[in-house]
Amino acid sequence: MTLLASPQAPTLASELTLATKGPADVLRGTGDLGVVVERATGSLALVNTSDREIINHIEGLGDLSHASVKFSRDERYAFVFGRDGGLTKVDLLTGRITQRIIQSGNSIGGAISQDGRYIAVANYEPGGVKIFSSDDLTLVADIPTTYEDKNGETQRSKTVGLVDVPGNDFVVSLFDAGEIWTLDMTGKKPGIERYRDIGEKPYDALISPNGRYYIAGLFGEDGLAKLDLWHPEKGVERILPDYGRGEKRLPVYKMPHLEGWAIAGDHAYFPAVGRHEVLMANTADWSLEKRIPVHGQPVFVMSRPDERQIWVNFAHPDNDVVQVIDTRSGEIVKTLEPGKSVLHMEFTPRGEQVWISARDSDHIKVYDTETFEELATLPAESPSGIFFTDRAHKIGL
Amino acid sequence: MTLLASPQAPTLASELTLATKGPADVLRGTGDLGVVVERATGSLALVNTSDREIINHIEGLGDLSHASVKFSRDERYAFVFGRDGGLTKVDLLTGRITQRIIQSGNSIGGAISQDGRYIAVANYEPGGVKIFSSDDLTLVADIPTTYEDKNGETQRSKTVGLVDVPGNDFVVSLFDAGEIWTLDMTGKKPGIERYRDIGEKPYDALISPNGRYYIAGLFGEDGLAKLDLWHPEKGVERILPDYGRGEKRLPVYKMPHLEGWAIAGDHAYFPAVGRHEVLMANTADWSLEKRIPVHGQPVFVMSRPDERQIWVNFAHPDNDVVQVIDTRSGEIVKTLEPGKSVLHMEFTPRGEQVWISARDSDHIKVYDTETFEELATLPAESPSGIFFTDRAHKIGL
């Protein structure tokens, strides 16, 4: 809270002047804001996509390697999930941390419920899901995600691939148990549904943009596990049986993130495991339709909001390049070099710009997605994930 | 601008207290705001969907019958298009009008460009499109939309169905000329492409959510005119040749609004002309697949953001009812009675609530879309259109 919002109005002009410095000095809409994770310094760069500028840096967020961010439904607050188990609520208007807790030893990501009231965190160490009030980060529910191992002993499973879906549910995968759980947050206690034997070692998951299909990647075997949330009675089905074939048992950090899938029109575009290919499947029957040769091993495969382009970045040592596929032809139409170690990309809501983080160049590049013209270069400390506030309005983001 | 944002900080506590009354008295995110058009009083009700409350009323907007609203890309400002040719820029944070102009004698709607810099208005009297700076509403371009009539004389056409599409273009239909124009706002002057002989008297149009298909309804003949903006070289094609058959030459005010179409998955749901039916077409070939019997003549046919439900309201005398179709079964699963003369519906961004305006009951009803529970009744003066700020982030809205 700032002085301006406090019940005691300041009585001296000097106090007011003090209070109005920093990001709160002007009234500001929050629809064109975003944050960039600066992992070297444990800070966020607060950015504005209208002026293409960094407004300020917000520090004190702990270990931000692989950090992810969700936004409150009013687009005012960012919830930052740190690898160190930290959960931090940041006020984009004042540029201050409003709450920060260490909720576990090692967390992998989180989600915000459809109604905006709950923040869920998937934990590695110890396993389980914790659910907090988005208001003040008080604990609402602690779900240990236990299962019986082969010896009949109760174990606690690591959790991955946590997303929100319509109906005020969360969906999560249990790495050790090989299960998918849905957590219904409509009532006072989470209503849990378990889907067992979904496949060996789900390591990540994605949700389709309409919240219907939850798809988990399997580290322990080939193929993917799909749950149709419009028809939960059908249970979990296996799709794309060849996905990962011949590449399994790679170190887990080499498996591509499934959040990097793009669903555009009737097709899903996704990174091949260990190959220089983007794969294109038909979403009607989830059959593999086409392999598109690309510059390196793809990491993120992202659709421009109008679904006409797919942007791809790559794993080391090919990570200085970004390629653009035209979805009309399925061919590469542009190769860009935004800097060293490109880690993430984010489109503005209507897709006219893309922001790209180049970690080892310590900058963010902004491009016009139609002309590929470079619009801005913004300095940042080892930038990684980029998150714009319009995610607040999107199912599963 | 408020005192707080002015370069001269107030020097007296009393001034500050005065300045901080009204909606600007707290810092506020703008992602959960919206406006409801109150046509009887020429005002907007500023609403908040997190607290489900009316924050205040903003007056002095002129004739708001059939008014529509667009939002700036930061979700701070609303641009209100009045039937009297008024174009008003409203600051949602201060609750004040920042600019207001009368730009024509009679206007039918407007659009905001993908980059947020331009506001376009489609005019009836006189015809044409005017383009303004979204910053201060100064005129940027005046496009008279002229054509040669059968006698070779130059006439000015009424314009309808104006939308924004990716590439920073606007698309508009010319009622009298029977043409579709695209207006490219990338350069200093609008780049105009004309599509002639698209059909007789286009009276309204819609754009698909990804900005690809522009579809105009025809008042002078049956069927619809479709322009695939990913393949403009193919020109305008005719689809759904039976649409409107036997119902043509009805008074234009009885033709359903095409903005009321819902595109969900592989299907488009839309109001039949003059019949108690919602029609379902396959978007692969635009063939008519199913007719769903409903309570009355549908007006708006809207998809919940997750595409699992279609909500429908109706023309007089059946306009006290709203029906919900489940897209899995294609059947009606709920009939609600929100009040007298239901005019419009708007979903919250992730679809957990729907807000419904009942003009002659002078209230807005808010429902939980999953349980159909009534969450709130909010008083408003003859409420009509409801517009939430997340439209700022959507192509064509």
Image: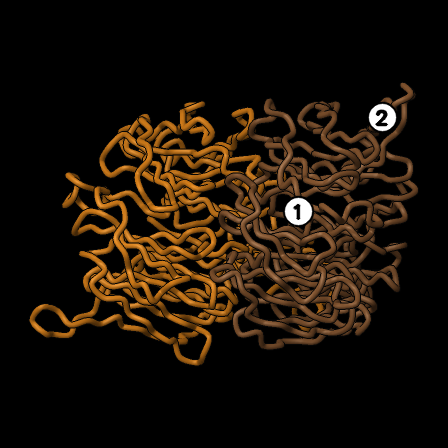
Chain colours: A brown, B orange
* Quarter location, residue A200: top right
Query: Is residue B56 or residue B207 the one in the foreground?
Result: B207
Residue at 60% x, 37% y is A213
* Quarter location, residue B144: bottom left
Q: Chain of mark 2?
A: A
- The answer to whether residue B107 is left or right of residue A223 is left
Residue A135 visible to an observer of this rendering:
no
Residue at 85% x, 28% y is A144
Q: CA distance from mark 2 to mark 1?
A: 26 Å
Residue A390 pos. (x, y %): 62, 53
Residue at 55% x, 70% y is A333
Q: Earlier in the sequence, mark 2 or mark 1?
A: 2
In the orientation shown, which residue stands out farthest toward the top?
A152
Residue B67 pos. (x, y %): 37, 51
Give the residue number, with chain letter if any, for mark 2: A146
Query: Is residue A330 or residue B223 the one in the foreground?
Result: A330
Residue B247 pos. (x, y %): 17, 40
Residue B1 pos. (x, y %): 59, 65
Residue at 88% x, 23% y is A150
In the orientation shown, which residue stands out farthest toward the left?
B151
Q: Residues within 10 Å of mark 1 (few under 14, many from 20)?
A: many
Give the residue number, with chain letter if any, for mark 1: A397
Residue B245 visible to an observer of this rendering:
yes
Q: Amino acid at mark 1?
A: Leu
- Above or below, B75 against B131 in this view is above
- The answer to whether residue A335 is left or right of residue B367 is right
For the residues labelled 2 and 1, say whether their Cβ atoms are less than 8 Å apart. no
Report the number of discs.
2
Q: Are marks 2 and 1 on the same chain?
A: yes
Query: Is residue B331 or residue A30 the one in the foreground?
Result: B331
- What label sits on residue A133 in the rendered view? none
Q: Amino acid at mark 2?
A: Thr
